Amino acid sequence: MIFIIGIVIAFMIAILGFTVFVDVGNGLGTVLSIIGGLVILFIAGRLQRRKEQNDPNILLDKMMMFFHEDGFQASTYIFSEQVDKGFAIDDELKKMRFIEHQPGGSTRKKDLQSQIFP
């Protein structure tokens, strides 16, 4: 949604640059409006990506995948209200796994930390 609003604003600035600023001055207004539109698109894209990374549904999917790694078959799940921490209990192995979301940092770095308790 944020990115769509950014596209609309950038399009309006570009139309303004191509229609009004072309007739006025030496073209500097047109160039500045195009650069301004690109900056708005860049900022809107970053905000949308940050919003999607912290979406509870995406975090829930990542945690559910984590709960079923390394032969751990969780039978019971408990999540925090913000879905940033979760417990899973494996009845067969008699183990418990704790997963916590670590926000921030690089996108390449794992953002979930997992611990298994016997």
Image (cartoon, grey):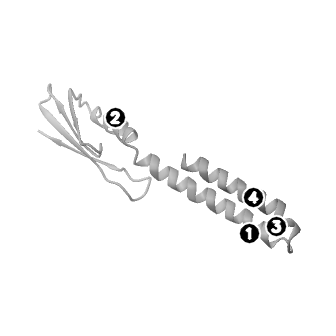
Q: At numbered mark 2, what does the secondary structure look like: helix, strand or loop? A: helix
Q: Residue at x 66, y 55 (%)?
A: 9
Q: Mark on residue 32?
A: 1
| Label 4 CA crowd tier, 10 Å (few <14, some 14–19, many 20+) | many
Q: Amino acid at mark 1?
A: Leu
In this figure, which residue is indicated by the disc labeled 2? 65
| Of pointers 2 and 1, the one earlier in the residue sequence | 1
Sequence-first tag of 3 and 4: 4
Mark closer to the chain start, 2 or 4: 4
Type of amino acid at the residue the image marks with label 2: Met
State which mark lies toward you, 2 or 3.
Answer: 3
**Residue displayed at 45% across by 50% down:** 51
Element type at mark 3: helix
Residues at badges 2 and 3 in contact (C-beta under 8 Å)? Answer: no
| Amino acid under disc 3 | Phe
Q: Nearer the viewer, residue 39 or 103?
A: 39
**Res. 116 image quadrant:** top left
Q: Amino acid at mark 4?
A: Ala
Counting the numbered discs, the total is: 4
Q: CA distance from mark 4 to mark 1?
A: 9 Å
Report how far apart the C-alphas of labels 3 and 1 lie in the structure. 10 Å
Q: Residue 76 or 93: which is nearer the viewer?
A: 76
Say which residue label 3 marks. Answer: 21
Q: Is tag 4's residue or tag 1's residue first in the polypeptide sequence?
A: 4
- Whether residue 78 is situated above or below residue 39 in the rendered picture: above
Q: Which residue is mark 4?
A: 14
